[in-house]
Image: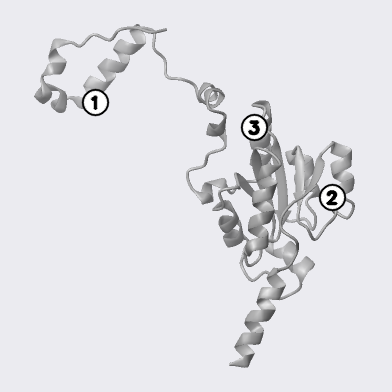
Amino acid sequence: GEFTYQRHAWTDQPDHVAADLPGAVDWILADLATAGWRPPAPEAAAAADPDAIMRAAAPADKIVTLDEAAAFARRCQAKGLKVVFANGCFDIIHGGHVSYLNEARAEGDVVIVGINSDASERILKGPDRPVMPEDERAELIAGMEAVDRVVIFEELTAECCLRAIRPDVHAKGTDYTAQTVPERAIADELGIRVAITGAPKTNASKQIMRAIRDKGLAR
């Protein structure tokens, strides 16, 4: 409830306050508590501001374990927020990745991105991949405004991520159709809607790598 805080005479004495600032703070907090004030719990703050549970201090803070990503999804869904999961290798970031994730964000309120580990990308893409190590790829994706959390996974597909996170939407890029998404069976089983997002597939990391090699050889 509301209360009126009355100024005490000694607080008008700057030298006294400066000399015993910790004691003054303790005294004020005790006086507030006596008047019935309590600091709001984190859960109450999140309820008042749903976006508060999504904010992270820095891109690196968005990079979490699978268990942490799943717990984050549960908290968001409990607040009525729609969770979108997107995944890929994201090796050599290009415009297609940006449009993919921006459009994925438009499918819901929160975006969690799964990134293939170095080992799994090597199996999927070949022995010369990845160009960028998993930690750097994760931090680059975490730096995007559309992205709320990032998790690195070891499997060749994102099935384990879908089972753990249970998103409302699984966003895939335009190199797939809703029928050819590798995780489609799991999505159907869990009641996850599949959405194809992003610009038409006109660029790829391998094309950028080929262009760099060609220009290097031409010199």
Which image quarter: residue 139?
Answer: bottom right
What residue is shown at x 90% (from left), y 46% (from top)? 185
The residue that label 1 is drawn on is 22
Give the percent coordinates (x, y) of residue 143: 54, 53
Q: Residues within 10 Å of mark 3 (few under 14, many from 20)?
A: many
Of circles 2 and 1, which is in front?
Answer: 2
Instruction: Identify which amino acid the numbered label 2 is placed on.
Output: Glu
Q: Is residue 166 above or below residue 145?
A: above
Q: CA distance from mark 2 to mark 1?
A: 57 Å
Q: Judging from the image, what secondary structure is the residue with disc 1 in? A: helix
Residue bearing the label numbered 2:
183
Quadrant for the N terminus in the image:
top left
Q: Measured from the top left, where is residue 3 in percent x and y?
A: 34, 7
Rendered residue at 56%/46% (across/down): 62
Dividing the picture into quadrants, the one containing residue 180 is: bottom right
Amino acid type of disc 1? Answer: Pro
Q: Which residue is mark 3?
A: 76
* Depth check, front residue: 91 or 157: 91
Q: Position of residue 38 (x, y in %)?
A: 41, 15
In this image, 133 relative to 201: left or right? left
Horizontally, residue 103 falls left or right of residue 145, namely right
